[in-house]
Each structure stands twice: as structure tokens, then as C-alpha cells.
Amino acid sequence: MSATSGILKWFKYLFLGAIVLLLLLILVKISPALWNRWVTYPGLEQARNELWEQYRKPPQVIPMPLYQGVVHSHTFWSHDSRGLLPEIMDGAKKAELQFIFNSDHKRNQLDTFPRGYQGIYEGIIIESGTEHSSGLMISPFDSTVIDWNRSEGEIIHDVVENDGLAIYVHSEDEHDWDNPDYQAMEIYNIHTDMKDEEGIFPILLNRLLNPKKYTHWMFRDLYDEQTEILANWDRLNQKRKIVGVAGVDAHNNQSFRARHLEDEKIEWVGPNADTLVIREPNWFDKLLMGEADKYGWAFKWELDPYFNSYNHANNYVYCDTFTNVNIRDHIKLGHVFVSFESLAKGDGFQYFAVNEADSLTAILGDSVNLAAADKLKVLSPFPVKFQLYQNGELIEETEESYEYEYVVRNNGNYRIVARVDLKSEWIPWIYTNTIYVY
């Protein structure tokens, strides 16, 4: 064998070795997504179906209807969303929402209300609001102009003074928690939950290799219990009532989409609704793009469609009348609980206090005298582990059950966490607001 043929042979082995190594590296990178597709997600689907089969409708004790909706959602009015009413409505109807409180980014320092979408659309209430870069969400519920040149404290005071709603969002960030006027804070936010993930590439790869029907489990993969935020919420409630809500932070903007323009050009839109390019269509564009769908997109690959955001975390509000101002008023009262809706529907869940005669004396969000709060009771449509927190400390946890009652012996702030069993893991499903016993 000549020296040249020996060298060529070694180069061949090196090349084949490099190919094998590359294939192994690719396999390592895609194996978690493939495992999700063939093992994890089908197993979770089966576990969730088994949970749903155990549904029992609870007796109605709280004498008010329960309305389901979301807080902190974005539309075309925001710089980082292209969301139009047809997409929003289709997602909302599929998620069975009854109200949406939007939080679009302001376009000018003088912020005019109402703007964007405002009113009742096909039976769904949509209320306009603003999310400021500081992490303040306001919903004025009025025809007004908000001057963002003023201090945040002044804006909160005036909005609240005029019957509006002021919520601190992105509660992982610093806020003026001692401000005396804001009424609520997010105890969960999808974007907040995503911040601790190890980059976007594994999420993109997981979406690429898994069918659309598993998108809700991809959202669930992001979930981490927000223990620090919950602890801060409990701490703040020792001083005064601060209502806890979930924010979906829906944008429908983590995507690659393309549409035809009127001048026979096409526009590619990327993440955060940014225009990537506008050009005359080339062979690649023609290969990928088909007929425009009813929203105008001729190509679409999405990570966060409205439905999946809307179906992830909901706010259920006990409210006597289905109007925007009544839902607002009952959110202020704390008559609301957070439900991770893709796990199970929260409809029918109830948390309340009764006196010695077993008569209703308070519901979640209410303050009640110790003499009138003989017991705290919880009813669930699904079997759960109930956890009772007093002043931020876990004081009791049950076995799996549909009902729970606790004999109240001391003053304090009491809230419930309900956990469902999915594949032998007890996952938070519902967070209630507090009953304040004084």
C-alpha cells in the first residue's frame, strides 16, 4: 500500500467518523423533542383525559354567576403584535372566554381612551388598557387621556380615583409595592414563566418536531411555580388587600408569517411582529406560500397563537351582572381565582366561609369577622389536593378529594391552592384569592 492511499484511507475514516459524530450530536439535540412527541405528551394527554372523566358538578353555594376571561393581552395597537379581531375572536371563542382586558403598549405620551378594540364582540367583552414599560397596566374604563409624562404614582392615583383598574404586571420585576392605590398584581405571567428557560432554540426545536395538537403541553413545559412572587403577594396582603390575577401576555407574535401585499409584493413577518423583508416573491416564497387564510396569511408557523395563550391561564370572576364595569368591580373585590385552564376547566370551583348555622358569610376576596367564620369550605369539580395557606404559610394539605373544610380558630389571611394529579405529579391548577378573617 502506497503512502498516498494510506493517507486517503485515514481521511475517509476521519470523514465517516465526523459524519457519525454529527449525526449523534443531532440525535442528542432532537431526542428530548422526539421523546416528548412519542412518550411524554401522549402520556400527559391520557392522564388529563382520565382526570376529566372524574368530573363532578359541585352544588352551587356562591349565589353569583362565574365569568371566565383573561387579563393582559395585546392587539395590533401594540408595536409588537399584528393581532386583528378575527384572530382574537377565534382564539377567544375556542377558549370559551367571556372577557378580555387588553393591555396594549402606548403609541404616544398622551394616551387616548378608548382605542383599539373596545366593546362587546359576539358576546365577549373586550376592554382597552395600556401596559407601560414600567410594568404598570391600567384600564381607565372611561373616555379619557392618560398623560404618561406624569409620575406613575399620580397616574395610578387618578385612574383608581376615577374607578379604573391599576395592576402591577411582570411581578418578577421591581415595583413600588408600597404604593397605596394599585388594586392588583400578577401572580402568574406566561412571559415571566419563560424567562428562566435555557434559550429559545430548544423551544423552537420542540415545536418543529411536535404536532400542533400538543402546543398546550409545550406551554406547560415552560411552567414553574412562581414561589417568590407568591411569597411577595402574601407579604403585601399582610398590609392591605392586593388582588392576585394571572396575565397571559398574549401577543401572537412568536412566529414566521408571510402575506401578499397590494403591489404584488410579499411581506415576511418574524418574531415580535417585526417586518423581516418586503420584496417581489421569488421561487422560495412561491414554494412556501399558498392561498391566504381568512386572516390574510399565506404562510404561517406559530409558537403562541391566541388560543393557546388564552387557554393557558384564566381568571374566573364571581360577578352578579355581565358588564365590563361589574367584572372590574368584582376583580377589585378579589372575587376571582386563577385557573390553569389547559389542565382542566375551573368552572364550578368555589371557596367560601360559613357561620355556625352553615350559612354563607364570605367568599374569596371578602373580609369576615372571626365570629362569623366558623369554617372555610372549598368545592371542586375535579379531585384535587387542597392546600390551605394562612398568612403565607402552608398550614394544611389534604389527600385527593372534591371537598375540603377547615375549622377557623384564628384571625388571618387564608387562601387555597388546588393541585391536580398528572402522571403522579401534583401540579398547581387553581390559586384562589384570600379570605381575610379579622
Image: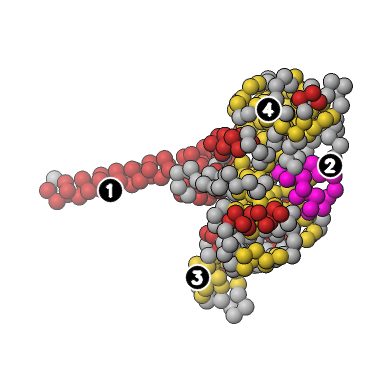
Query: Quick check: 101 left or right of 284?
Result: right
Mark 1 or mark 3, whichever is nearer to me: 3
* Residue annotated with mark 4: 412
Residue 214 x %, y %: 61, 44
Along the line of sight, the residue nearer the viewer: 35 or 355 = 355
Question: Which class describes the residues within 10 Å of circle 4: few (<14), some (14-19), or many (20+)?
Answer: some
**From which residue to which does the magenta span run?**
315-332
Question: Which numbered disc covers residue 65?
Answer: 2
Q: In the picture, which quadrant includes the C terminus?
A: top right
Query: Quick check: 34 left or right of 141?
Result: left
Q: Are marks 4 and 1 in contact (CB under 8 Å)?
A: no
Q: Sequence order check: which comes first, mark 3 or mark 4?
A: 3
- Say whether residue 403 is visible: no
* Residue annotated with mark 1: 15
Question: Which class describes the residues within 10 Å of circle 2: few (<14), some (14-19), or many (20+)?
Answer: some
Question: What kind of residue is marked 1?
Answer: Phe
Query: Quick check: 17 left or right of 136?
Result: left
Query: Alpha carbon of mark 1 to alpha carbon of mark 3: how far?
Result: 38 Å
Q: Sequence order check: which comes first, mark 4 or mark 2?
A: 2
Residue 106 x %, y %: 60, 64
What is the secondary structure assignment of the residue under circle 1?
Answer: helix
Which residue shows up at 79% across the image and 53% down it?
325
* Residue annotated with mark 3: 277
Q: Sequence order check: which comes first, mark 2 or mark 1?
A: 1
